[in-house]
Image (cartoon, helix red, strand yellow):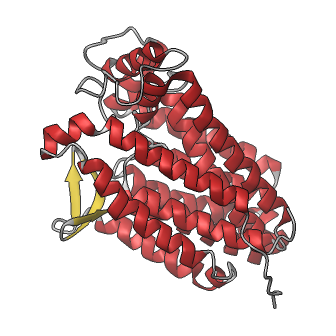
Amino acid sequence: MTSKSNQKPDQILTITTFALIVFGLVMISSAGVAISQYRFNDGYYFFKHQLFYGVLPGLFLMYIVQKIDYHFWRRFAFLLFAANLLLLVLVFIPGVGLKFQGASRWITLGPFSFQPTEMLKLTMILYLAAWLESKKDLKRDLFEGFIPFLAILGIVGFLIIKQPDMGTLGTIVVISVVIFFLSGAKTVHIASMAGMGILAFLALVKFESYRMNRLLVFLHPELDPRGIGYQINQALLAIGSGGFFGLGLGHSRQKFNYLPEPVGDSIFAIICEEIGLIGAALLIFLFVTFAMRGLKIAKNAPDMFGKLIAIGITSWIIFQALINISAITGLIPLTGVTLPFISYGGTSIIFSMVGVGILLNISKKCGKI
């Protein structure tokens, strides 16, 4: 039995989330104007699509979910995860899955498309939290905890690599390992997974030329600036030209068909170009605030299930933001991972907001934080 609470959801987290959403809509409106006009003959296509098919349904679901006691999700965690695995298989079925630029990552439902890996980030967190809580001290056992956890990651990893989507796989693996470690797993098991992860990464890079190219460009950014090094060089040009205050909102040059994916994984470069270091620092401050509130909710959660969910959702948003910003500034190889709440993508923002809704419900049970 869990005690009911009349506590309001965390106000700082709520305000921070709304600020990130508004920030994202403003930047999609600005960064996407050229490519929207070119592709759809409508300068605000991406803005309107993000608003009506992402933000508004996301707000509705976030409002509903934050009213549902988070223990409700324990009962359905496995079913949601299993259904999500089925969706990952369906992306490869002709007529159901959509293949675009060599990647099978979407399911089409009439005029709508849906990316199951975005849902997986949330269902994986819920399932692992329920499973690890039920294991109690057995999660430290080799055969009861470590090997089953590796099997879960192996199944998920196989389905995502077949798409392929290495950036998303990396995000999901890190989130899962963080949850596993903080649930009380043995350090030696985490260390062995780190070693296996490095070997798997090297193997994946070696056997796919485009991954090797991304690694080569990371090591040598000047390499082939008109070919494999084009995106990172244009991104760095955008970031550098923004300076301290930026060129002004709406005044980016790189968004005019120079920088690839200006509303996707490259949007941080447009932010730096238009509103400069000041705007980039403001965005990073919002993510830091989100992290601090999320971790405080995790620390004060009344039980292990709530604690692990809060850790997972916070790690998901913050790690993905860190990966995107690091990649587009040249600190790590390009991954294609989008910036949470900011980049274009209806599926991504909807499930991110559902995750925040669950986090807000946990915050109601924490008392004063």
Q: From where the camera sits, is residue 183 visible?
A: no
Using residue 106 as the reference point, say whether residue 174 is left or right of it: right
For residue 296, above or below residue 141: above
Q: Nearer the viewer, residue 224 or 263?
A: 263
> Is residue 257 visible from the viewing direction of this image?
yes
Q: Can you say which quadrant of the picture contains the N terminus?
A: bottom right
Q: Quadrant of the C terminus?
A: bottom right
Instruction: Judge by depth and name the residue closer to the eye, 12 or 219.
Output: 12
User: Which of the two residues, 295 or 164, is positioned nearer the viewer here?
Assistant: 295
**Figure label count:** 0
Q: Residue furthest bottom?
A: 1
Q: Position of residue 269 (x, y in %)?
A: 44, 27
User: Is 270 in front, or is 89?
Assistant: 270
Q: 122 above or below 224?
A: below
Judge from the rendering whether residue 37 lies leftward or rightward of residue 255; answer left or right: left
Q: Position of residue 338 (x, y in %)?
A: 44, 43
Q: Position of residue 326 (x, y in %)?
A: 55, 29
Q: Residue at x 64, y 43 (%)?
A: 286
In the picture, residue 142 is in which quadrant? bottom right
Residue at 57% across, 50% down: 19
Q: Seen from this angle, which residue lies furthest left?
A: 41
Residue 8, by quadrant, is: bottom right
Which residue ends up furthest to the top in the rendered image?
222
Q: Position of residue 70 (x, y in %)?
A: 68, 78
Examine the rendered structure and indicate whether residue 355 appears above or below residue 254.
Answer: below
